[in-house]
Each structure stands twice: as structure tokens, then as C-alpha cells.
Image (spheres, rainbow, N blue to C red):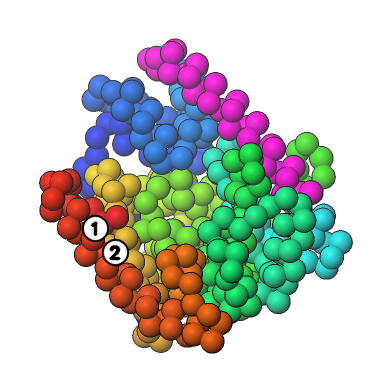
Amino acid sequence: MTAARLPIPATPEMELLCACLAPGRMVVLPARPVDWSRFLGLATNHHVLPPVQRALKTTAKTGQPVPAEYLAYLQRLGVAISANNLRATAILRRLQERLAAAGIRLIPVKGPALAVLAYGDLALRQFEDLDLLVARGDLLRAVTLLEQEGYAALELPPTADRERYLAWLQDWSLHKPGDPLHLDLKPVLISHTLCGPESAGFMAAACRPLPLRAGGTLLAPGPEAMLLAVCADGANEMWGKLSAVADVAALLAAFPGADWLGLLRDAGRFGLRRSLLIGVGLAEILLASPRPEPFRTAREEPAAQRLALAAARRIRAEESLKTGMIRQTLFALRTRDRVRDRGRFLRRLLFTPGAVELNQIALPAGLYPLYSCLRPFRLAWDAWRGRSRRVVTGAPEQEP
């Protein structure tokens, strides 16, 4: 099941982009003319500049007509991305050591650990922030220690009850003034709507030292757990960017002998099996990524196949970056494996407050339960206001 066999129409720029991201394949330029400026825009928006630069550099060596000015531009971007990644990795290593001294594990989800695992090179994957998983019982201490390092909560108001906010399983976004790199601390794998605290224990148990080319190690989950993280995040984001699909294909190619059967069992326990199958299906459809044997027997799950095809069509049609929040939420809901998973998703989505509610209205500690009652009205108001703006401005249909 590939895009060529379905077929799923695409522009020559999208065809070339997918070809550049297919692991281990020689890139052949499309028969139709390529608009190189448009192609570069697609690669930028899908966050895949480093692997595209590598693929086109190899393609140019075969004598195919890749414009030299675009190769030079991609080379300059690649140097900047590499420098950013090296700096972020150094920060991550230092913070891991700092918190480990206090008995706290900082577990990287994606970011530099995924770059090394999937691509074997820090420079070959783009990331802007560090997503860090912390056990719920350690998270408040971790925040305090990071504040001592100069970080501050980016979204949470100073008056917020941190114990209550922690109980809601929301992310904690931290930043240091003058530093563009943000830290996102998570008590669950990806999102409180998709995962429970048990996912943090699973990721912690999967951790091992990951050697770095420049020396030293990162404590990071292995390929199976990292693939689950990528696919869960893809479900949450409706697979908007090809970078996530490329990550799936790269992990499968780099670790053909991994315990994928065991991962399918673990994903089933967490209600993430369908999300995992969608990610593997997308890698097969868009990037011709071979399925490891355990995933072949699960190929025909109808719901996963339908959602993978829908996501593939949106990516190939270049519509995936325009997805609104309502449509994205409905997609994430459909990726839930069981009825109880969908019920939990809706319950937490509608009634679990976040930093937005805390910033919009300040309630005394005794009235904090009212935030759960206010959230549905806030969500409805935001949806109505966004729809009103679309009607007034005549903008393309898109949820804010």
C-alpha cells in the first residue's frame, strides 16, 4: 500500500519531498518541472530541511539538475540547525546531570535523543524545544530546581496552585529569559487527553544510556518507546508535518530487529495501538517504508487503515498544515482504541482545566473546582469566536 499504487495525487514538489525522506533510497527528480522556491517552502514548513539537504546533495552528485543556489542555501540552514541542536543537547545533558543529583530523571521525548536514535546524527533532525518527561511525584521538585537555574513558567500565572495544576496532568512550559529554547515538562507521555501517568513509568523503564558522537551519553528511551512517542504525538497533531512520518520510517529502518511485537502489546495496554498502526501505515504509504513482520499481521485493522489513508491524502494534497483544532481533536478521538479511551479523552478535554483558564480568571483555592465547569464554556466561546472571524474576513475555512 503506497501512494504510487493508490494513487494519491501530489504536486511534483510534494513528490520530491517524500522521495527525499524515504530511508535508503536514491532520489530521482520528478518528470514534471519542480518549482524550487515552492519546494523549499514545503521542506521548511514540514521541518525536514536537514534530511532534504542530505538527499539533494547526493542527487546532485548523480548529475541531476538541482540548482546550486538552493543547495548552498540548504547547506547554510543545515549548519545553523546543527549548531542549535548541539547547543540544545549540551543543555539537556547538563540538566539531566543537575536533576539526577537530586534523584530526578529527565526523560527526553523526541528532540536530540530521537535524532541520534533514528538518524544517527544530531544534525539530521529539526527541533525547537526540549520535551521532557518527569514522573508526576518529581515534577514540582524538578520545576523548583529549574527555576534555580534561571527558568520561569511561561504560561502558568504566579498565583496558581501548583499542586492542583499538577493533578490535572498538564504540561509545564519553562523558559529562561534571553534563551529561545523552551523546556516542556510532561507528567504523561504526550497529552493528558491521550495518556495517563502509567505512560511515564513505561518510558522511564525503557531508558538506557545513548552514546553521542561528540562524547558522553544521554539517558533516553530505546527505539520501541520512542516510536510510540512519535506515533502518539502524531495522533495528537493529526500528522500535520511530514517530519513525524519521516521519524517513523527512520526508526523502523534503523532498528529492523527491535521488539516491535512487544511494543504492539504495550501500546494496546495504553490504548495507543491504533495510533502506532497509523504511524507505521503512513510511513509505508508516503515513504515506501517496509513494515516489520509484527506490523504486517496488523495491517488490515480497518479503522487504522482508514485514518492512515485520510492523513496521507491530506499530506499529499498539502492540506495537513491547515488543519483546525476541531478537526484535529476529532481525528485524535478516532485514534482511541476502546470506548473507555474515547470517553476518557472527551472527559479530560472538556473538563480538565489548563493554563488558559487560570490566566483568564483568578479563583480562590476553595473555588478551584469551578475551573472544570468554566472550561466547556471557554472552549465553546473560542470556537464561536473563531467561526465568526472566518465569516467576517472571508478567510479560508480553518479553526483557530
Is the C terminus in the top left, top right, bottom left or bottom right quadrant?
Answer: bottom left
Percent coordinates x, y for residue 254 in the rendering: 60, 48
The residue at which mark 1 appears reads as 386
Residue type at tag 1: Gly
Give whichever of 2, 127 is nearer the camera: 127
Residue type at tag 2: Asp
Give whichever of 295, 186 is nearer the camera: 186
Percent coordinates x, y for residue 311 in the rendering: 31, 56
289 left or right of 261 in image = left
Is the N terminus in the top left, top right, bottom left or bottom right quadrant?
Answer: bottom left
Percent coordinates x, y for residue 67 in the rendering: 39, 14
Task: Classify 28 as above or below 177.
Answer: above
Residues rendered magenta in the picture: 65-94
The residue at which mark 2 appears reads as 382
> Residue 172, located in which quarter of the rendered image?
bottom right
Q: Are marks 1 and 2 in contact (CB under 8 Å)?
A: yes
